[in-house]
Amino acid sequence: MALNPSDSRAPDPSVKELENQYSPSRWVIRLGAEEALRTYSQIGDEATKRARATRRNLLHVPYGDGEGENLDIYFPEQVSEASPFCVFFHGGYWQSGSKDTSAFMVNPLTAQGVAVVIVAYDIAPKGTLDQMVDQVTRSIVYIQKQYPRNEGIYLCGHSAGAHLAAMMLLADWTKHAVAPNLRGFFLVSGIYDLEPIVFTSQNGPLLMTLEDARRNGPQQLLEAALTQPVDPACHVLVIVGQHDSPEFSRQSREFYQTLCRGGWNASFEELHDVDHFEIIWKLTQDDYVLTQMILRTILQEP
């Protein structure tokens, strides 16, 4: 769905169809749209309260000077600065969601020796996309500097959070005087080409222009990138739900293909019988297929 850069008109399909395709709650199959959103929020809230009550943690740790620039760190029972770290960026179309309701994966991962970090960033209208990308970058820099003996930093993002994680594939770490020990990416039901969003109601709080979309679009940036992956062993797992919309599925497949062409160690998974919200809230379950994929990658099991 690439747009002519000189053309500010809406692309085909129609604006109405774009609105439908980029409204994930319209594609749920077991619950109504409103109920799916309520359930997603409720499960995230309960998982976070449980994680804070049962896991060693550091909450609201500042990684920058801004009011919204803080993160939560949850540690495994055997606390070690040499643990692997899984860093999670929540979704919400860059305008909703919170780290305080996003600790879905904390208990299953910490039980297996993985520290989990949940990052806050300034959502719209307070934050712009450029600011969010910068904040996410600095949150990773903070973890690397604070825990330099880590056994790998793995980034996981859902929906808009997957976009922010994907932007880290192109980050310039030299200006931060640190090279994060990035070992893997888990990009879950993400958006990698932002141009269609410009023509939807989701853009209301974002006020994103086509220029903003291209500057912050990992799909276009990777296609244009001449650099090779810093670490060829860094694994990028692109994941989408069977019941995500066709556009979300297309975006994930095309991003995976672009990664492969660029020499990245990438794989693609369509998870059976889950929608845009179930795909992430099920991370509360130890035996969930994505929980197991994440653990196998981090623990380097076959």
Image (tube, helix red, strand yellow):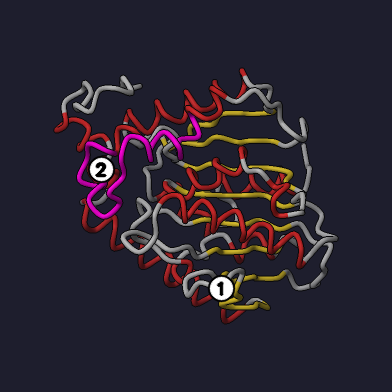
Region in magenta: 198-219
Residue 45 appears in which quarter of the rendering? bottom left
- Is residue 74 shown above or below 36? below
Depth check, front residue: 281 or 232: 232
For the residues labelled 2 and 1, say whether their Cβ atoms are less than 8 Å apart: no
Depth check, front residue: 128 or 77: 128
In the image, residue 26 lies at what x, y percent? 22, 43
Horizontal side of 50 relative to 251 (left or right) equals right
Looking at the picture, which amino acid does disc 1 mark?
Answer: Asp
Q: Is residue 1 visible?
A: no
Q: Residues within 10 Å of mark 1 (few under 14, many from 20)?
A: few
Q: Is residue 183 visible?
A: yes
What whole-number distance in Å separates the C-alpha atoms at marks 2 and 1? 34 Å
- Counting the numbered discs, the total is 2
Q: Which mark is residue 23?
A: 2
Looking at the picture, which amino acid does disc 2 mark?
Answer: Ser
In the image, residue 223 lies at what x, y percent? 54, 22
Q: Residue furthest bottom?
A: 53
Residue that badge 1 annotates: 65
